Image (cartoon, rainbow, N blue to C red):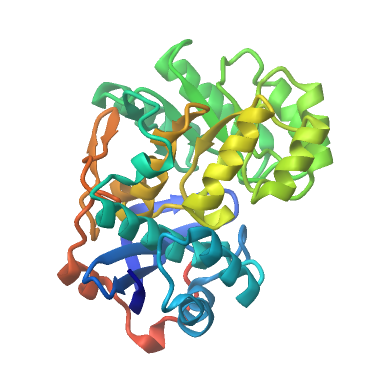
Amino acid sequence: MKIISATIHAVRFPLREPFIISYATYPDMPAVILKLETDTGLVGYGEAVPDEHVTGEYFLSAYEVLKEILVPSIIGENPFNIEEIHHKMDAAIWGNPAAKAAIDIACYDLMGKATGQPVYNLLGGQAHDKLEYPRVLSIEAPEIMADKAVKAVRDGYSSLKLKVGKGDPMDDVARIKAVRKAVGPEFPIRVDVNQGWRTPGVAAAAIRELEGENLKWIEQPIRMGDIRGLADVRRKVAVPVMADETLHGMEELHEIVRLEAADVLNIKLMKCGGIFPAVHIAKAAEAAGLQCQVGSMVESSVASSAGYHVVMSRANIQSAELTGPLLFSEEIGDLKYELPEVLLSGEPGLGIEVDEAQLEKLTVKKDEVGLAGRAS
């Protein structure tokens, strides 16, 4: 089996409401959907969701890197040769993990369809009985976040993820305390700062104010790349610390382990380059005694299902936050969510159907691909 052709779609997924985090506001979500075809007639889908603040990629760059560099480098390859494909992509261009993830995911979709197996069976089988997901709340006023949290509990969510990190850290403390008061002392809450508290001193002071709030963890409180600073924060606080934007691949993982900088790791397929490297990171983390989750870059059913297959296959991946399809008012896939669980179909490959007509509808014109995808 060989990859013989590719179709690349630049799309914008409309959001039900703006998605607000510390470093950006998303009016819609730009992504690149890749379709690979083989000489056996099989079709595999992949997805790139670039983020200039995290991976150094953006809408136009991901599209062009796939079109001009990465896809040409793997035409003629057998998708089962996934290690060789990653070596070829890395030799063709440095970095660009989201673009590489699109090819990686499409190859796994093809592998699963060729063998008649869901992707998780190619990675290690079924390590979990169920996969749950949280209600993710954007940054808003404390009372609004509290009201939305109460509604989420009533709707049947089993946990909450609060986005904070914009403005005064003490305003974030007020947001978190308001939500905790609204949902009671035991309901699981995780907090994501998205680098917004910037420095170790500021972050440690804010976290100390939250030590009585029974939080599952505080995610990436300081700027990405400062692993030593993250270790300093972890030593000074009692709340578990998660590394997200700081962790891209094995090099950062090694430093996080060496410096004891985090209690939990957030693996994202868009940060590390896809399913193949994500599994390697999870295995290395397990050897170091660290738990993981697979997080979201607000992907569609294509990359979200890929992430859930990784979660399903690894016992030390204890949580997932792949809720992008729930945030879109229009989508291209049929990944199934039934509160509080996501249900992988068990069908071959990613186990989803892609609506080609909807994909064409959401594809932007060529001269719009270069427009900025995110508002600051």
Q: Is residue 236 left or right of residue 253?
A: right
Image point 43% across, 51% down: which residue? Answer: 19
Image point 29% across, 46% down: which residue? Answer: 326
Residue sitting farthest toward the front: 1
Q: Position of residue 337 (x, y in %)?
A: 24, 38
Give the answer, above or below, for where 287 lies relative to 266. Answer: above
Image point 29% across, 72% down: which residue? Answer: 38
Where does the C terminus fall, quadrant-wise? bottom right
Q: Nearer the viewer, residue 311 or 72?
A: 72
For the question of whether residue 105 can be seen, the reply is: yes
- How many numbered badges does the structure rendering display? 0
Query: Quadrant of the rendered structure where residue 92 is?
Result: bottom right
Q: Position of residue 68 (x, y in %)?
A: 50, 85
Q: Nearer the viewer, residue 48 or 80?
A: 80
Query: Quadrant of the rendered structure where residue 147 is?
Result: top left
For the question of whether residue 264 can be seen, the reply is: no
Image point 27% across, 75% down: which residue? Answer: 39
Query: Quadrant of the rendered structure where residue 172 is?
Result: top right
Give the answer, above or below, for where 322 lies relative to 91. Answer: above
Q: Is residue 223 left or right of residue 61?
A: right
Q: Position of residue 17 (x, y in %)?
A: 34, 52
Where does the N terminus fall, quadrant-wise? bottom left
Q: Is residue 353 left or right of residue 311?
A: left
Q: Position of residue 129 (x, y in %)?
A: 32, 23
Residue sitting farthest toward the bottom: 367
